[in-house]
Amino acid sequence: MKKSSNLDFIDTDSFTLSGRVSAPEIYADGFSQLLLGFPTTKIVFHSLVEPHTEANAKEERRVVATLSLSTMDAIQLATTILAGCKKSEVQLGLGADQYLSRLKAAIAQLGEIKMPSGAEPKKIIDGNTL
C-alpha cells in the first residue's frame, strides 16, 4: 500500500525509492550485445550514428550505456516487460495507430516539396528517402 509519493520519492510498505526524477535518463535506439551468464548479465545499449543504406553497407552504432545486473533480475525484468506488453496490448496498438495517423496528416499538409536543382536526399532507409 502506498504511504507517500512525490515525483522523485516513493515510500511504500515494502520499499523506499528515491531519485526517480534526479537520476540520469538514457535513451538508446537498441541493444547490440546481451551477455547472459551466472551470476551477472550485461546488456550493451547503442544509439544509431549512421544507418544502413544502399550506399553505406555497414550500420554505425555508438554505445550509450552498459547495464550490468544479476541474471535473476534480468529474467524478472524481461518477464515484467512482456507481461506489461500483454496487459497493455490494446493501448499500445491504439498509440501506434494514433501516431501513424498524425504522421500521415502532417505529411499530407506539406504538399509536394520540390528539391533544388542538383540536390539529392541525404539518407535512404528501407527504400524511403528522408
Image: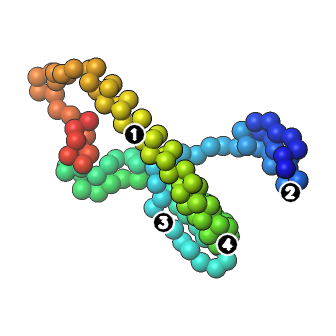
Q: Are marks 2 and 1 in contact (CB under 8 Å)?
A: no
- 3 or 4: tag closer to the N-terminus: 3
Q: Are marks 1 and 3 in contact (CB under 8 Å)?
A: no
Q: Between label 2 and label 1, give the one nearer the viewer.
A: 1
Q: Position of residue 87 (x, y in %)?
A: 57, 54
Q: State how far apart marks 3 and 4 are (Cα).
A: 18 Å
- 2 or 3: tag closer to the N-terminus: 2
Please name the amino acid that badge 2 sits on: Ser
Q: State how far apart marks 1 and 3 are (Cα).
A: 30 Å
Q: State how far apart marks 2 and 1 are (Cα).
A: 38 Å
Q: State how far apart marks 2 and 3 are (Cα).
A: 33 Å
Q: Give the labeled residue for mark 4.
A: 72
Q: State how far apart marks 2 and 4 are (Cα).
A: 20 Å
Q: Give the labeled residue for mark 1.
A: 97
Q: State how far apart marks 4 and 1 are (Cα).
A: 35 Å
Q: Give the labeled residue for mark 3.
A: 33
Callout 2 secondary element: loop
- 1 or 3: tag closer to the N-terminus: 3
Question: Residue 69 falls in which quadrant of the image?
Answer: bottom right
Q: Between label 3 and label 4, give the one nearer the viewer.
A: 4
Left-right relation of 40 to 1: left
The residue at the point 24 percent across, 56 percent down is 57
Q: Between label 2 and label 3, give the one nearer the viewer.
A: 2
Callout 1 secondary element: helix
Question: Residue 22 falls in which quadrant of the image?
Answer: top right
Q: Give the labeled residue for mark 2.
A: 14
Q: Between label 4 and label 1, give the one nearer the viewer.
A: 1
The residue at the point 42 percent across, 35 percent down is 98
Callout 4 secondary element: helix
Q: Nearer the viewer, residue 127 or 12?
A: 12
Q: Position of residue 126 (x, y in %)?
A: 24, 48
- How many residues crowd mark 4 within 10 Å: few (<14), some (14–19), many (20+)? few
